[in-house]
Amino acid sequence: MKRVNTLDAAWLAVESDDTPMHVGTLQIFSLPENAPETFLRDTVARMKSDCEVATPWSQKLAYTGALGRLVAPYWITDRHIDLDYHVRHSALPKPGGERELGVLVSRLHSHPLDFSRPLWECHIIEGLENNRFGLYTKMHHSMIDGISGVRLMQRVLSKSPDDTNMRVPWAVRPERGRRQTSDRTATLNWAFNEALEALKIQVDSTPKLIGALGRLVHAARHSDDRLTPPFVGPSSLLNGRVTGQRRFATQQYDLERLKTLAKQADASLNDIVLYLCGTAMRRFLLEQAVLPDQPLTAGIPVNIRPADDEGTGTAISFMIASLGTNEADPSDRLAAIKASTASAKAHLQSLPRAVLNQYTMLLMSPYILQLMTGLGGRMRPAFNITISNVPGPEQPLYYEGAKLEAMYPVSLIAHGGALNITCLSYAGSLNFGFTGCRDTLPSMQKLAVYTGEALEELEQSINPATPGKRASRRKPATKRTRKSSAGVSK
């Protein structure tokens, strides 16, 4: 047995019927030219016949009950995996559009995983119009985070459309960096030395850890401090209790266009992403007359995994930033976001890597305790919304000759946070995935549309010489032009 590490175990601890803690990816492929009618059926049959199942796909919990997950979270290897259960073939009513695909993905993402089995499912979805199909894969967050999930799926795909008989995702074992693959023998003496080294690091870093927490306390007491601490964001429509059903919407933009805009605004790409999300949220809440006077805050996961480590456990820290939703002027809103993110980055970078896990647990422990004790959504939130930006593959990829046209993240939500926006870059595009509570956000698809209009607004603000310019999304390589993929959430 292998014990689940502390950060990963936290996702197991807060699992409930209303807050399933799995994450997913929706990939949209175009069928190869001259593909036979049985292409997908044959592909699914081959996937199910491949019995080689690698870690983490082969892992399941030793103790599946709520108490076992809380006090004794251990992984064991399932040597009798039922691929007929984990790999499923679905079809949309032809011609299936973005709306029909979104309805299906929303429903699939609402279903919790079976804790008596390895915590993943893969759904192949045929019938998407313009000769396309979807691949929706979900896995529990205790097994994988966004960065490692993208890296793992990237290793499944090929840069060549000519490759065939490719490995299935669950046969691909993640690679680890050199430090994780050392051949040192785990002797008692080695373990003792490792323990002493860990203790030394802990003692040496404690003052910095205490200083970082003190800095957050100072920021909470002084409103003019640009650093945004947890629990200062206002209670809003997004921050009540959630139910188990989900909505999902997507949006896609040309990545180079966003980078050009960031350069013109002297901002980072992440600042532009936060601006689009914050502006969309401001308009969405204004229309319902529930916009708080204080700015909404965003919890932003930050990857702390070494570049050469392709392991699959959680390796993230968090920073919190203002979304400037109290600013009516676009320029002032962006300036507030830039100042807040700059301060948050400097604060996080002041900590040595060795203590980032401890810092993250201390920062997030009040939020986790809210969820575990049933107080989530009943008191002031740690932050109002989660917004992530995950770097993905830069070149077009293929599976069995089918070209990957788009890749959208499907994330999780919890009590106190009814909306999650995750962005994923791929082959020159930035793909937004909006995951929300179905009952809290019945018109969530508007948010996806509003990000596009926010982009137009910012471009016209920075380049007033071209006021008539209309923003257009990057067109996918299909025979038709999609006006918007936001309607998939209905």
Image (spheres, helix red, strand yellow):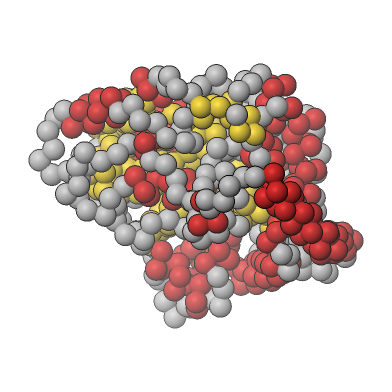
Q: Is residue 196 left or right of residue 36?
A: right
Q: Position of residue 438 (x, y in %)?
A: 56, 32
Q: Position of residue 70 (x, y in %)?
A: 72, 28
Q: Is residue 268 left or right of residue 239?
A: left
Residue 403, visible in the rendered structure? yes
Q: Residue at x 32, y 36 (%)?
A: 168
Q: Position of residue 105 (x, y in %)?
A: 43, 32
Q: Is residue 220 left or right of residue 14?
A: right
Residue 312 vertical placement versus 465 (above, below): above
Q: Quadrant of the N terminus?
A: top right
Q: Residue at x 60, y 57 (%)?
A: 304
Along the line of sight, which residue is nearer the eye, 71 or 450? 71
| Number of marks present in the image shown | 0
Q: Residue at x 39, y 31 (%)?
A: 53
Residue 183 vertical placement versus 257 (above, below): above
Q: Residue at x 36, y 19 (%)?
A: 84
Along the line of sight, which residue is nearer the eye, 271 or 471? 271
Residue 414, visible in the rendered structure? no
Residue 441 vertical placement versus 273 (above, below): above
| Residue, far left | 34
| Residue, far bottom | 465
Q: Position of residue 452 (x, y in %)?
A: 46, 57
